[in-house]
Image: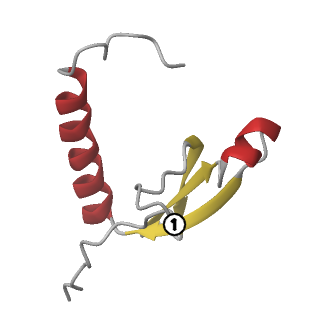
Amino acid sequence: MEIPIKEDLDTNPDGTIKLSPVAGWQTVRVAEMMGLLRLHYFADQQSLARLETKAIQLGMTPSQCRELGQALLRMAEKLSQLPGSDVPRN
């Protein structure tokens, strides 16, 4: 079953796009049939300054894992073509 996805992005009160920087991730195989993706992130500037992360755990099927991986690779390819993208971030 395909669930429609709303295209609206979360925004700040000033209208800018709300971003939560990714701090890390873990992947775990669950019950031999599902993958778990745990994303660690900084909720806001204050948590970033204090290095306090939050996390969300997402259950994914094998096909969802592949689709997400391919979408991230496509985004990485596009981003790597931008000026200044060769600057180390980590």
- Extreme residue toward the right, this view: 50
Foreground pick, 61 / 77: 77
Label 1 belongs to which residue? 13
Q: Is residue 73 above or below residue 41?
A: above
Residue under the image location 25 percent in, 78 percent down: 5
Residue 3, x across and y down, in percent: 24, 86
Q: Is residue 74 above or below residue 54?
A: above
Left or right of 24, for residue 60 = left
Left or right of 47, for residue 78 = left
- Pick the quarter of the image with the N terminus: bottom left
Classed neighbour count for the residue bearing mark 1: other residues with Cα under 10 Å, few (<14), some (14–19), many (≥20): few
Residue 40, x across and y down, in percent: 62, 50
Residue 48, x across and y down, in percent: 71, 40
What amino acid is labelled 1 in the image?
Answer: Pro
Q: Is residue 74 above or below residue 84?
A: below
Q: How many marks?
A: 1
Residue 70, x across and y down, in percent: 21, 46
Quarter-of-image position of residue 8? bottom left
Q: Secondary structure at mark 1?
A: loop
